[in-house]
Structure formats: structure tokens, C-alpha cells
Image: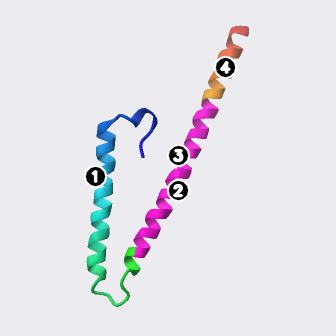
Amino acid sequence: MLGGEQANNLEAKEIRIRKRRHAEERKRLLREANAELEDEGIIVGIYENIQDELRVKNRLLRKERQKVRNVELFRSVINVAIEPGR
């Protein structure tokens, strides 16, 4: 998902699509390798769990970055408001 400044950036979208295809290809290869094992799906399940965990942590990181940007913006607004009084 792309938003903000990157919403219309075709290059960023293509990079995201390439990364997704690469991850899907890796999952496909794991499934093929896993087909030979007795407990089918264990490796793929672990990989999907890691991917889910990574998505959640990335989402939290984006939220925290937004909070930092908001605080920095607030600080700069306060500095501008205080500056003329000096």
C-alpha cells in the first residue's frame, strides 16, 4: 500500500509489486521443497507467520514515524509562534 507522496509514484509501485512477486516465488519454491517432507506445510506456515509478523511490525513502525513527524511539526509551529516575540 502506497500513500501520501508516493501515491502516484509508478516506480515505487513497481518496486512494491516486484518485492511481492519475489516473496510469492519464494513461497512457491518452499511449497515445492516441502512437498517432499512428511509434515507438509510446516515450512510454509512458518514463513507465512514471519511475513504476518513483519507486516504488523511495519504497520506499527509507520504509525510511530507519523507520531514523530506530528511532534516535529508541532515543535516547529511553536518555535515559529514564539520567535517573533523575541
Q: Earlier in the sequence, mark 4 or mark 3?
A: 3
- Mark 1 → mark 3, Cα distance in angstroms: 21 Å
Label 2 belongs to which residue? 57
Provide the secondary structure element on which disc 2 rests: helix
Badge 1 amino acid: Arg
- Whether the magenta-drawn stretch holds residue 58 is answered as yes
Label 3 belongs to which residue? 62
- Mark 3 → mark 2, Cα distance in angstroms: 9 Å
**Residue 83's quadrant in the figure?**
top right
Q: Earlier in the sequence, mark 4 or mark 1?
A: 1
* Labels 4 & 3 near each other (Cβ < 8 A): no
In the displayed structure, would residue 46 be above or below residue 55?
Answer: below
Label 1 belongs to which residue? 18
Provide the secondary structure element on which disc 1 rests: helix
Label 4 belongs to which residue? 79
34 relative to 56 in the view: left or right: left
* Labels 4 & 1 near each other (Cβ < 8 A): no
Badge 3 amino acid: Arg
Image quarter of the C terminus: top right
In the displayed structure, would residue 37 be above or below residue 64?
Answer: below
- Mark 2 → mark 1, Cα distance in angstroms: 21 Å
- Mark 2 → mark 4, Cα distance in angstroms: 33 Å
- Whether the magenta-drawn stretch holds residue 62 is answered as yes
**Residue span colored magenta:** 45-72
Residue density around tag 3, few if under 14, some if 14–19, many if 20 or more, within 10 Å: few
Labels 2, 4: front one: 2
Labels 4, 1: front one: 1
Q: Earlier in the sequence, mark 2 or mark 4?
A: 2
In the picture, the disc for residue 74 is none
Badge 4 amino acid: Asn
In the displayed structure, would residue 44 be above or below residue 63?
Answer: below
Residue at x 60%, y 28% (from the top left corner): 73
